[in-house]
Image (tube, rainbow, N blue to C red):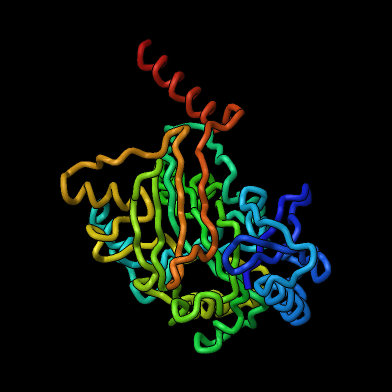
Amino acid sequence: MKLASLKTGHPDGGLIVVARDLRRAVSAASVAPTLRAALDDWTFAAPALQALYDALNAGEATDAFDFDAHACAAPLPRTHQFIDASAFLNHGRIMTQAYHPEKKSDPSIPVLIQRQADDFAGPHDDYPFPDEADNCDFEGEVGVILGDVPMGVRAADALQHVRLITLFNDVSMRKHLFRELGMGFGFVLAKPATAFAPVAVTPDELGDAWRDGRVQLVMEASRNGERFGAPNGCEMSFGFHELISYVAYNRNLRAGMLLGSGTFSNVDYRTTGSACLAEQRAIEMLEYGESRTPWLRFGERLRFEMKGRDGQSVFGAIDHRFVQAPYVNSVNQVNQSATAEANAGASE
């Protein structure tokens, strides 16, 4: 089944069930007011939501209405925990080769990072950021939304705890990312709000494209209406079952946790292209000795979409514009003041 959250003024939105073809929808308020509530009581909610979904697809749902992705928040507008992986080792290899060839890493251990989870962006929301000098980037990813997962779960048993799968743009500010990486304690300014496709789906909606803990479909990414890349999720180096088992090694995971795949990346990048600017710029550095692709600027538009084996959109599209934030960022004020003081001191 396919689920979404309408913007209602409530932080968690209002849960709706969406038809397989993304044309019609029906309120799920009779089952659960929000997706957070449904996940907390999935044993009860899932069968009732499935019944609504079946009726909707059969044209028998009362009070059905036209589905409007522009009216949607993220499927899960906020949650208690978001952990993002970098599970496509090809991406890491490209970045390391371009910028840190001396760096060694253990390919048997997944890289994961705690992320902001209290303010996800919707699929068509304008995305504000303070300064083009922050080197704004995008990363096309998929994520799984989990039910309760017991500590120590084996990889072989982990996928039974996946409730939903969704598509997102993991926005990155590369200027802050490289600085925060050097500090060695995790990202804050480098990783602002994440933007999501309108719909989250149960794994069965993907058919045989959900295999080995991977979404084995093409991620279509475009910039200002032009194709940027179309990498396939089949090359994910760690499946979600392995990532879940790793994270749950010494802790329980609670219903509603979001776990991301990391940016899609394929070995044959010359054919598939990339799903993020940093990777494309690294490829250019390796091939030409310089990066030629610019970072995002105000007014640019990005689109991400994934189609199933039948050619239909699975999650709906993320299609959003990047704009200047309507405030002066205090971090930039501090940086500018420090620069001004340094310049003044140098002139004395």
Q: Nearer the viewer, residue 313 or 93?
A: 313
Residue with the most extreme left position: 288
Say whether residue 255 is visible.
Answer: no
Instruction: Specify the quadrant that holds the N terminus.
Output: bottom right
Question: Residue at 41% across / 73% down in the picture?
Answer: 216
Answer with left or right where residue 308 lies relative to residue 18.
left
Question: Residue at 39% across / 62% down in the picture?
Answer: 264
Q: Nearer the viewer, residue 97 or 267?
A: 267
Quadrant in the picture for residue 328 = top right
Answer with left or right where residue 311 lies relative to residue 23.
left
- Is the residue 244 above or below the residue 24 in the image? below
Say whether residue 332 is visible.
Answer: yes
Instruction: Specify the quadrant that holds the C terminus.
Output: top left
Answer with left or right where residue 288 lies relative to residue 7.
left
Question: Residue at 37% across / 73% down in the picture?
Answer: 234
Residue with the most extreme front position: 59
- Is the residue 279 above or below the residue 32 in the image? above
Quadrant in the picture for residue 218 = bottom left
Q: Residue 322's x, y, as percent?
A: 50, 38
Q: Residue 14's x, y, as percent?
A: 76, 58
- Is the residue 312 above or below the residue 212 in the image? above
Residue with the most extreme right position: 30
Q: Residue 331's x, y, as percent?
A: 54, 33
Q: Residue 16's x, y, as percent?
A: 72, 63
Count all numbered tags in the image, as a single digit.
Answer: 0
Residue with the most extreme top position: 348
Question: Residue at 46% across / 19% down in the picture?
Answer: 341
